[in-house]
C-alpha cells in the first residue's frame, strides 16, 4: 500500500481558535469495509500520519484503519498557524471526538492507537474526552508520560517554561530536539522511511514554552487516572540519550526513557498490559521489519485475547 493510491483524506473543519481558522484531517484506508472493528491512529509531536504499512497490516488483520492529523500538524497545518502549537492538549479533543463519531457511525468497536505525545493526548482523552465511552481499548506506542530528564532538570525546565510563557504565548527555544531520531528513520539518512520534511523536519520545530507547560499539565492530570477500557503499552527494550546519531539509535528509544513509560503507564487504568518490543525504535512500528512484526504480533494478540466487553463504560 502507498499513501497516494490506497488512502483517502477528509478535511474536518473545526471551531476557530486564538490563531484563527482551524482544521484536522482524517485519513482512511481505501481497503476498509465499514463492517468490522476500527483502529484510529493518533501521531506524536513533530509528526503526522505517513505509515501506509500500519494501515495495511491492520486491514490484513481484519480491522478498518483511520489516522488523524491533529490541528497544526501535517496535512492539517495552515499557513497562519504556528506548527504543532497548543496551549492545552484538550484542544485536540474536538477532532478526536469528531473522528470517533464518524468512524463509529460506519463500523463496530473503535480502538485508539497513539504514539508518543499522541499517547499522552489519547490517555487524557480516555479520562476526560466526551466520546471516550465509544472507545473499546487504548493502544499506546511509547507514550510521552514524563519528560526524559532528571528530577532537578525537570524542575528547572518547568519553572523557566511557566515563567516565560506567562510573559509571551509564543516565546520559544530552538534546538531542543535532537536530530538523531529523525535521522534514524528517514530514508535519506540512516532509516527506511519517507516523510514530508516540511511537516516533520529533521531538526524539529521550535519548542514553545507554552507547549511545555501544556505537556506538564497533561502529565500531572494522569497522576490519578481512571481509564476504564483495557490499555496496551508497547515500548522498546532499552533507551539511551544521545544528541548525535549512533548505531545504537537503531535499536533503542532515544526520545523517551522506557522506565518512565513503564512506571507511569502501568497506573493508567484498571487493566494495563505492558509489552516490551526488543530492540525497537521510539516508534516501534518504524523499527526494522523483524522488530515491528514482533510489535504487530503483540498488538493483534492483545486485541484478540482481551475481554473488552467485560469493561464497564
Image (cartoon, helix red, strand yellow):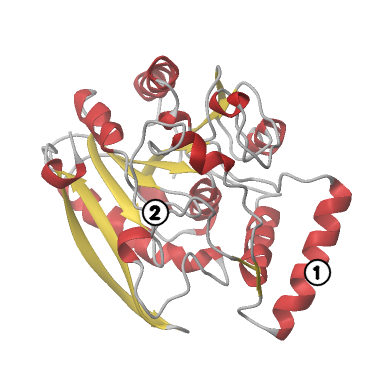
Q: State the image coordinates of residue 300 (x, y, percent, origin top left).
A: 36, 22
The quadrant of the picture occupied by the N terminus is top left
Extreme-right residue of the structure: 152
Q: Residues within 10 Å of mark 1 (few under 14, many from 20)?
A: few
**Displayed quadrant of residue 251:** top right
171 vs 131: above or below? below
Towards the viewer: 243 or 39: 243
Residue of label 2: 197
Towards the viewer: 145 or 286: 286
287 vs 65: above or below? above
Tag 1's secondary structure?
helix
**Displayed quadrant of residue 148:** top right
**Displayed quadrant of residue 253:** top right
Side of 200 where 221 appears, left or right? right
Q: What residue is drawn where x is 85% and y is 48%? A: 151
Side of 101 where 200 appears, left or right? right
The quadrant of the picture occupied by the C terminus is top left
Tag 2's secondary structure?
loop
Amino acid at each position: 500500500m502507498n499513501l497516494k493510491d490506497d488512502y483517502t483524506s477528509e478535511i474536518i473543519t473545526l471551531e476557530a481558535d486564538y490563531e484563527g481558522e482551524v482544521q484536522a484531517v482524517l485519513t482512511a484506508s481505501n481497503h476498509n469495509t465499514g463492517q468490522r472493528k476500527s483502529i484510529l491512529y493518533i501521531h506524536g509531536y513533530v509528526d503526522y500520519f505517513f505509515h501506509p504499512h500500519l494501515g495495511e497490516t491492520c486491514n490484513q488483520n481484519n480491522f478498518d484503519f483511520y489516522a488523524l492529523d491533529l490541528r497544526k500538524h501535517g496535512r492539517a497545518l495552515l499557513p497562519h498557524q504556528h506548527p504543532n502549537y497548543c496551549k492545552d492538549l484538550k484542544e485536540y479533543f474536538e477532532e478526536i471526538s469528531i473522528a470517533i463519531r464518524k468512524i463509529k457511525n460506519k463500523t463496530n468497536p473503535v480502538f485508539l492507537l497513539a504514539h508518543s505525545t499522541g499517547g499522552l493526548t489519547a490517555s487524557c482523552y480516555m479520562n476526560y474526552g466526551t466520546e471516550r465511552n465509544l472507545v473499546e481499548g487504548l493502544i499506546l506506542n511509547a507514550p510521552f508520560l514524563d519528560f526524559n530528564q532528571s528530577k532537578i532538570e525537570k524542575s528547572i525546565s518547568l519553572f523557566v517554561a511557566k515563567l516565560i510563557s506567562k510573559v509571551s504565548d509564543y516565546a520559544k527555544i530552538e534546538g531542543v530536539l535532537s536530530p538523531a531520531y529523525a535521522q534514524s528513520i528517514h530514508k535519506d539518512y540512516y532509516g527506511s522511511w519517507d516523510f514530508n520534511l516540511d511537516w516533520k523536519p529533521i531538526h524539529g520545530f521550535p519548542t514553545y514554552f507554552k507547549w511545555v507547560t501544556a505537556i506538564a499539565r497533561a502529565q500531572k492530570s494522569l497522576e490519578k487516572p481512571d481509564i476504564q477500557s483495557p490499555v496496551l503499552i508497547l515500548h522498546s527494550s532499552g533507551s539511551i540519550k544521545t544528541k548525535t546519531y549512533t548505531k545504537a539509535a537503531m535499536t533503542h528509544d532515544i526520545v523517551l526513557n522506557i522506565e518512565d513509560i513503564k512506571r507511569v503507564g502501568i497506573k493508567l487504568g484498571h487493566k494495563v498490559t505492558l509489552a516490551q518490543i526488543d530492540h525497537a525504535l521510539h516508534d516501534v512500528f518504524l523499527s526494522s521489519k523483524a522488530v515491528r512484526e514482533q510489535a504487530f504480533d503483540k498488538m493483534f494478540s492483545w486485541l484478540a485475547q482481551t475481554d473488552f466487553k467485560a469493561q464497564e463504560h
